[in-house]
Image (cartoon, helix red, strand yellow):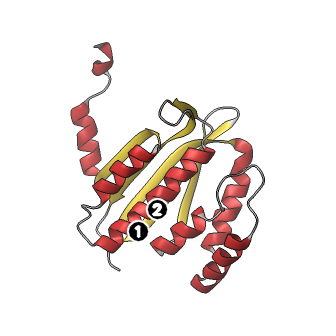
Amino acid sequence: MAYMEHFSVKTFKQQLSARKISLAFQGIFSQDVLALIGKSLRNTPESRVIAKRLFAIVIEMAQNIHHYSAEKQYSEKDGRDIGVGIVAIAEDDDHYIITSGNCIIKTEVPPLIERANYINGLSPDKLKQFYREQRKAPQREGKPGANLGFIDMVRKSGNPIEINIKDYDETRSFFILSVKVNKEL
């Protein structure tokens, strides 16, 4: 039980409460985990619409982790490696803040920052147009998905996405993505 000397569940709970973190998950993002997160979000006090937006953004973040995390673990149920990361939902007086984090290969950092900055700079009309263009575009070679995640997050939240990159080791960075969702529609 030596590990318990370094970790206090009570302190951890106090930290979660102080930061108003209502949900935190670290590990592989399987369908079962997403179903549990969805069930938890149905209890969002503001409205069903807000809960749907929160869940849609969590799904986008989980898919990013699932597909692009440089850290993988084997899933017996899925029979393959799945990305590992973390997702948390916190809140302040006016917003829910959804944050994800996972390791990525350092060479992937500049295109992510460029894409996020581009999407954040678009007006709502231009964002809608860009979304339509991306839906019609061919799938990127060697990349899963339709390349719509950041666009969907901005459209559903009504707020820009925030990216923070931290060095992890020689070849990987830790990619942190945050999105605010207004409590008032």
Q: Are marks 1 and 2 in contact (CB under 8 Å)?
A: yes
Residue nearest the viewer, comparing 64 with 178:
64
In the image, residue 169 above or below residue 163? above
| Res. 72 image quadrant | top right
Q: Secondary structure at mark 1?
A: helix
Q: Residue at x 36, y 46 (%)?
A: 24
In the image, residue 74 above or below residue 111? above
| Res. 183 image quadrant | bottom left
Residue nearest the viewer, comparing 128 with 77:
77
Q: Position of residue 80 (x, y in %)?
A: 58, 34
Q: Residues within 10 Å of mark 2 (few under 14, many from 20)?
A: many
Q: How many marks?
A: 2
Residue nearest the viewer, comparing 157 with 42:
42
Q: Position of residue 62 (x, y in %)?
A: 50, 51
Q: Is residue 84 visible?
A: yes
Amino acid type for the residue under numbered disc 1 = Arg
Q: Secondary structure at mark 2?
A: helix
Would you say 159 lies left or right of 70 here? left
Which residue in the rendered view is the most extreme toward the top?
Answer: 2
Q: Position of residue 165 (x, y in %)?
A: 60, 48
Would you say 184 lies left or right of 174 here? left
Alpha-carbon span between mark 1 and mark 2: 6 Å
Q: Which residue is mark 2?
A: 57
Instruction: Quadrant for the C terminus, please.
Output: bottom left
Q: Which residue is mark 1?
A: 53
Q: Which mark is residue 34?
A: none
In the image, residue 14 above or below residue 43? above
Instruction: Quadrant for the N terminus, please.
Output: top left
| Res. 52 image quadrant | bottom left
Amino acid type for the residue under numbered disc 2 = Ile
